[in-house]
Structures are given as C-alpha cells and as structure tokens.
Image (cartoon, helix red, strand yellow):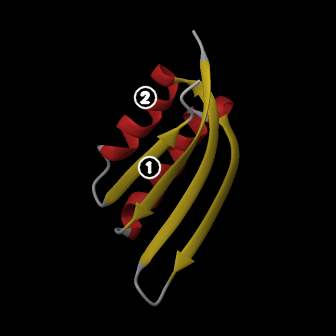
C-alpha cells in the first residue's frame, strides 16, 4: 500500500486523557517521524503535533483511536501521493 506523509494535530482538553493518548501514540510509533507537545497551562490544554509517514489505513487507525478518547480533538492533513 502506498505511503503518505502528513501532519496530525491533537488538542487534549482533559488532563485525565493524556495517559491514553500517549498509549495510542506508542502503539503507532512506527509511523510517527516526529512529535512536539506543548502544555498550555493558562488554558488548561495540551497541544501535540505529529509528523507521520504511513499508509492511509495506518494513519486513519491512529487518528480514529485518538478521536474516540474523551476530551481529545484530532485533525490531519496528508500529501496526495
């Protein structure tokens, strides 16, 4: 299956969900090329950006699992080829 490069943006609005988010990211570590996480304490959220390289199925599995976690919002953008 063809691989794509993309960016995944994650906003964690509930601190209790951070552990589950990290578990999911660990499960999909093989497609994560880079990660930057910024806790924004004044607003009570954490923002994580990922650079990913994988099939659309692999990336969708990652974002789908993250999107099911309570208090987590996820968006992604992928290359066309």
In terms of sequence position, does the residue under pointer 2 or pointer 1 come before the other? 1
Quadrant containing the C terminus is top right
What whole-number distance in Å separates the C-alpha atoms at marks 2 and 1?
15 Å
Labelled pair 2, 1 in contact (Cβ < 8 Å): no
Q: Residue at x 47, y 50 (%)?
A: 21
Residue at 60% of width from left, 40% of height from top?
26
Q: Nearer the viewer, mark 2 or mark 1?
A: 2
Q: Residue 58 in the image: x percent, y percent?
A: 51, 24
Question: Dividing the image into 4 quarters, which one contains the N terminus?
Answer: top right
Q: Name the quadrant containing residue 60.
A: top left
Residue 57 at x, y percent in the picture: 46, 20
Instruction: Please state which of residues 49 and 80 is positioned toward the viewer in this rendering.
Output: 80
Q: Quadrant of residue 61?
A: top left
Residue at image location 29% in from the left, 43% down from the top: 68
Q: Is residue 47 above or below residue 67?
A: below
Circle 2 is placed at which residue position?
A: 61
Question: Of the numbered discs in the image, which one, if any, rests on residue 20?
Answer: 1
Question: Crowding near pointer 2: few (<14 within 10 Å), some, many (20+)?
Answer: some
Classify residue 12 as left or right of residue 31: left
| Front-most of residues 58 and 78 | 78
Mark 1 residue element:
helix
Pick whichever, 28 or 78, lies toward us.
Answer: 78
Q: Residues within 10 Å of mark 1 (few under 14, many from 20)?
A: some
Q: Is residue 25 above or below residue 27?
A: below
Residue drawn 33% across the image and 45% down it = 67
Q: How many badges with numbers are in the image?
A: 2
Decide: is 81 above or below 36: above
Give coordinates of residue 18: x percent, y percent: 46, 60
Indicate left or right for 54 with 11 as reference. right
Secondary element type, mark 2: helix
């Amino acid at each position: 299956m063809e691989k794509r490069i993309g960016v995944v943006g994650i906003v964690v609005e509930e601190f209790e969900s951070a552990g589950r988010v990290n578990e999911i990211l660990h499960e999909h570590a093989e497609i994560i090329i880079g990660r930057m996480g910024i806790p924004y304490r004044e607003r009570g959220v954490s923002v994580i950006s990922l650079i990913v390289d994988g099939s659309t199925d692999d990336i969708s599995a990652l974002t789908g699992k993250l999107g099911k976690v309570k208090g987590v919002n996820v968006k992604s953008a992928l290359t066309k080829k």
